[in-house]
Image (spheres, helix red, strand yellow):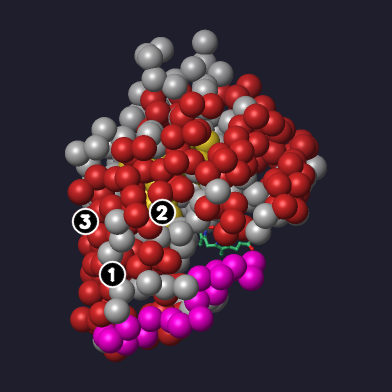
Amino acid sequence: MGQLPPFLAACRRQPTTHTPVWIMRQAGRYLPEYRKVREKADFLTLTKTPELAAEVTLQPVRRFGMDAAILFSDIMTPLEGMGVAIEFCPGPVIAEPVRSAAAVDRLRPIDPEESVPYVQQAIRILRQELTVPLIGFAGAPFTLFCYLVEGSGSKTFTRAKALLMSEPATATRLLEMLADTVARCLEAQAAAGAQALMLFDSWAGLLTPGDFRSVALPAVRSILTRLRSLDVPLIYFPNQGATLLEDVATLPADVVGVDWRMPLDRARAILGPGLAVQGNLDPTALFAPPAELERRVDEVLDAAGPAPGHIFNLGHGIDRRTDPDAVARLVDRVHERSRRN
Ligand code: CP3
């Protein structure tokens, strides 16, 4: 069934021997082996030490046999090189948020080889070690904008959205600079060996459809258009984006990540046959009894349907309190239930 590994074939909507599966935040604190490495190094040190980043990237793939690995890093990683100091406590905290035209003027687009050489180095190490494809990633401009302006996580990102509404020219300039930085980072990741590239738009769902279309989407489009000439699949994940999918369908992406709030059959009907889908089990299902977890896995597979172009994933990142045995059950169930020969 083709030469490509299942994950890359599914990204290109080609038939596969089984539905490929990986999990957002698959390397992280729910894994005892991750917590062991974290005893010796804080999160930022992990992301900046290629050997350690590579080791924790490999942990879930080794334990569960996922069909893809995702580089251990963070969407905040490029910001330091732009001139923004970041801490993790454990969520990202920016002591001096960017809230004025003058603050935007002080930022600079980064050269990834100079600012984040450890990211590319981790990718090179991983390509030597991995037998499944490696996903590189970055934050989408609007999501990075949210943290930069707000200065930390938030349920509503009111300050960030208020800047967008009151100083649209400043906001647009910041989004364009972020788009340029993200594109450069992803180009560097692909050059180092990343085999697919994913944009996380965790806060896209906070925008009105009109603001999403006029402000967030153009920045995503400019990145994807620039990366289109690289021969790697492009994945866009607009979290809580069910009402935005008509617009998302116009992007030059290969795969759209779907959260659990919309069933995949409806998402596919809106996105059309030209896009693969990735998702979308509610991460809370991993806390249900085994039979209920398996029933919900099957429900996602059934909703995705028989057409090629489904990558199984959670609808958002895995909770740190998850039992690793439930993840093993999920991966095995996806593989068994979707086997096609
Ligand atoms: O998925 C993976 O396994 C790859 C690694 C990865 C991390 N963060 C590691 C991480 C990826 C792809 C991300 C993306 C990321 N980071 C997003 C987009 C995805 C999403 O969840 O919407 C966002 C919004 C961030 C920002 C961020 N980084 C937050 C909000 C936090 C705190 C999370 C928490 O649960 O406390 C982080 C820290 C972070 N990034 C951790 C990990 C494993 C926890 C670090 C630790 O203490 O060990």
Residue 104 in picture, x, y percent from top left: 29, 79
Corner quadrant of residue 295? top right
Residue placed furthest toward the front: 114
Rounded to the nearest angstrom, the CA distance separating label 1 from label 2 is 14 Å
Residue 245 in picture, x, y percent from top left: 35, 55
Does residue 114 appear anywhere in the picture?
Answer: yes
| Residue indicated by mark 2 | 116
- Of the two numbered discs 2 and 3 in the rendering, the one whose residue sits closer to the viewer: 2
In magenta stretch: residue 304: no
Q: Is mark 3 within 8 Å of ligand 1?
A: no
Q: Amino acid at mark 3?
A: Ser
Q: Amino acid at mark 2?
A: Val
The residues colored magenta run 86-104
Label 1 residue SS = loop
| Residue indicated by mark 1 | 108
Does residue 266 appear anywhere in the picture?
Answer: no
Q: Quadrant of the N terminus?
A: top left
Q: Residues within 10 Å of mark 1 (few under 14, many from 20)?
A: some
Instruction: Give the residue at x 28% y 86%.
Output: 102
Rounded to the nearest angstrom, the CA distance separating label 2 from label 3 is 22 Å
